[in-house]
Image: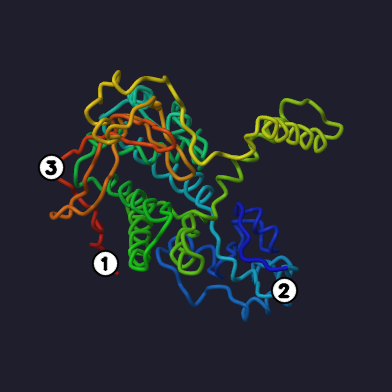
Amino acid sequence: MLLGQLTGDNLGIHKLLGYSESFVANDPYRFCRMHRQQCQTACRLDSSLLRNRQNYEQDPQLSSLRKTGVKNASNFNELPDFHITENFCPDIMHDVFEGIAPLDIRILLNKLITSGQLSLSGINSRIDRFNFGHFKKDKPSPITLQNLRSTSTRMGQSASQMCTLVLKFGLLFRNLFSKNCLTWKLYILLREILDVILSPSVSAVEIPYLESIIEDHHYLYQRLYGLTLIPKHHHLLHYPHAIRQVGPILNFWAMRFEGRHRFLKHVANISCNFKNIAKTVTKRNQMCLSYKFLLNRPFRDQYISEVSELVQISDTEFLETISQTLGTDEGVIHILNSLENESFKIKPKDVLVKCWNDPNCQPLFIRVELLFRHDSTYFLVHKIYRTLIHISMPLIFRSRTR
């Protein structure tokens, strides 16, 4: 049996691999042996404290969870070409969207309220009226005063809702923060971190940049509010090292597993069967899969498109554009509401980045006007937008003393 990597939430992986299941222990981390008190202020990763095969071999022999953070030797180490100290997969979902991001967003929203820029009802009003587009199914829930006063890392939002709120926060509230506001810079640092760790591909030059902005983020978080870092802050320090070892870590997060489990948990909640709940959940899952097979749709098609109507080419308002595209070819075209495959989903009125080949090093944007299908070929009609100004995000907080 060959095993590459194990992935899951922090508690599950710690239990599976035999590490401490308490994150307030002296050595609560599976990636390194840094003491808990050091981790509360550390903004940099100390590579000399990383766990490896050599220092791990001594830990189970000491039989001291307090000193080593290792509860018991793992049977996974008996597999060929695998060792638990070389399992580098972190979990973005639990570390960031159920850990770091809620803390930062709470700070930002409290800043708006205490400065008198916006009331809590005004915040919820902006969120409620905002057009989230493709993210509308993960629209954030209304924020309560209890959410803002709590020290919890959940803030009343699911991980997908928190992801949406962080990604759209700049569009929602940017005009209420001054350019030099350090609280706003904290958000920009978080947003820059997400741009890298959520990317499906990461270049070698981006990894040192990620290390730097994580360091800046942690330092600014402590300087502004005098708060100690939580364990999930320390997990973030290991992300650049993990990317070096296993590539883009978006491929390993638990969001997809949690989404799959949602159906199973929903069945368990509504079935009211406490005699053999495992059998009930399994049977419902098999029935759902059988239904998909009966419909001949067990898996997603290469293209999933919603057809709104069938029209003749001569009836469409984009006659000239379509005629130039199709030439003299006649026939029926399908006007589409959306076009989707495994990696993207496009709808009319979406604004997309076409390329970065502009001579002035500025992105070229297009707006989707029409999607249609003719025979088995899909077409996109768009307008090109001229970029007036494009502001890149450099390293924004480097003035600190050692």
Proximity of marks 1 and 3: CB atoms separated by less than 8 Å:
no
Above or below, comparing residue 113 to residue 354 in the picture: above
Nearest to the eye among marks 2 and 3: give it.
3
- Mark 2 / mark 1, whichever is N-terminal: 2
Image quarter of residue 381: top left
Tell me if residue 335 can be seen: no
Nearest to the eye among marks 1 and 3: give it.
3
Quadrant (top left/top right/bottom left/bottom right) for the C terminus = bottom left
Q: Residues within 10 Å of mark 2 (few under 14, many from 20)?
A: some
Q: Position of residue 264 (x, y in %)?
A: 69, 36
What colour-coding does the image apply?
rainbow
Q: Position of residue 192 (x, y in %)?
A: 33, 52
Residue 60 got which mark?
2
Proximity of marks 2 and 1: CB atoms separated by less than 8 Å:
no
Residue displayed at 76% across by 35% down: 281
Image quarter of residue 277: top right
In the image, is 60 to the left or to the right of 343? right
Q: Residues within 10 Å of mark 3 (few under 14, many from 20)?
A: few
Q: Which residue is mark 3?
A: 388
Residue displayed at 29% across by 45% down: 183
Query: Alpha-carbon distance for marks 1 and 3?
Result: 38 Å
Above or below, comparing residue 237 to residue 273 in the picture: below
Quadrant (top left/top right/bottom left/bottom right) for the N terminus = bottom right
Q: Nearer the viewer, residue 266 or 180?
A: 266
Label 1 element class: loop
- Mark 2 / mark 3, whichever is N-terminal: 2
Query: Alpha-carbon distance for marks 2 and 1?
Result: 40 Å
Q: Which residue is mark 1?
A: 401
